[in-house]
Amino acid sequence: MALVDTTPLTNAQQARRQRVLDAAMDLAAEGGYDAVQMRDVAARAEVAMGTVYRYFTSKDHILAAAMVYWTELLYHQLDEHPPRGVTPADRVLDVLDRALRALNGVPKLGAALFTSINSADPAGIEAQQSVTKALDAIVLRAIGDNPPADEENRSRMIGHIWYSAMVGWVNGWSPIERVYKELEIAVDLLLPQT
């Protein structure tokens, strides 16, 4: 039996679900992961607690869904602001730099979103997979034309480096500059400047 109703949503339901996501992201931006409580999310979104639970099983589920939403937004922003750079490595680093600057601009939110996708919550695991797919799509799109034959493997490895470097940032033992440097090394190794 599903814990969350999976029937297609009407426009009004989609709007309510988005309000819940927005409320959770606002609370996380203000106070971090611990500041996101289901009751507070419902109050901020101006919905009943039952409405929150209709769409999300837990705090981790909401925040993981917010991470998926955030990653998909980054992908769609590439339409408006295509990756800059001459080589695939330049373009991938440009896009990853944008993502890091965005997360670093709201560090409590970034840490909360990242914490949620590390949850053992089944909905969090599903979100992990969605974030991985979206990040792969972002990197592959940035690589552009004439990719290396094994571009999907290279993209996946860049995603793994991003993930592991972000663990250090979230836990406070690696500044965002180090995360960028580790990504730069990985991209230079995996996407030579040719």
Image (cartoon, helix red, strand yellow):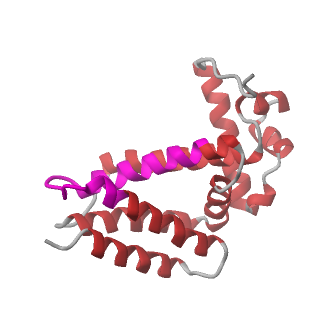
Closest to the observer, 132 or 64: 132
Q: Position of residue 90 (x, y in %)?
A: 25, 69
Q: Quadrant of residue 149?
A: bottom left
Q: Position of residue 1 (x, y in %)?
A: 75, 22
Residue 130 is left or right of residue 126, and the answer is left
Q: Quadrant of residue 123?
A: top right
The answer to whether 79 is drawn above or below residue 94 in the figure is: above
Closest to the observer, 144 or 123: 123
Boundaries of the magenta span: 126-155
Residue at 78% x, 52% y is 36
Magenta region includes residue 136: yes
Q: Answer yes or no: is residue 73 visible.
A: no
Q: Position of residue 180 (x, y in %)?
A: 43, 76
Q: Position of residue 136 (x, y in %)?
A: 38, 52
Magenta region includes residue 79: no
Q: Answer yes or no: is residue 137 visible.
A: yes
The answer to whether 1 is drawn above or below residue 186 in the figure is: above
The answer to whether 73 is drawn above or below residue 154 in the figure is: above
Residue at 72% x, 46% y is 121
Dominant secondary structure of the residues highlighted in magenta in the image: helix
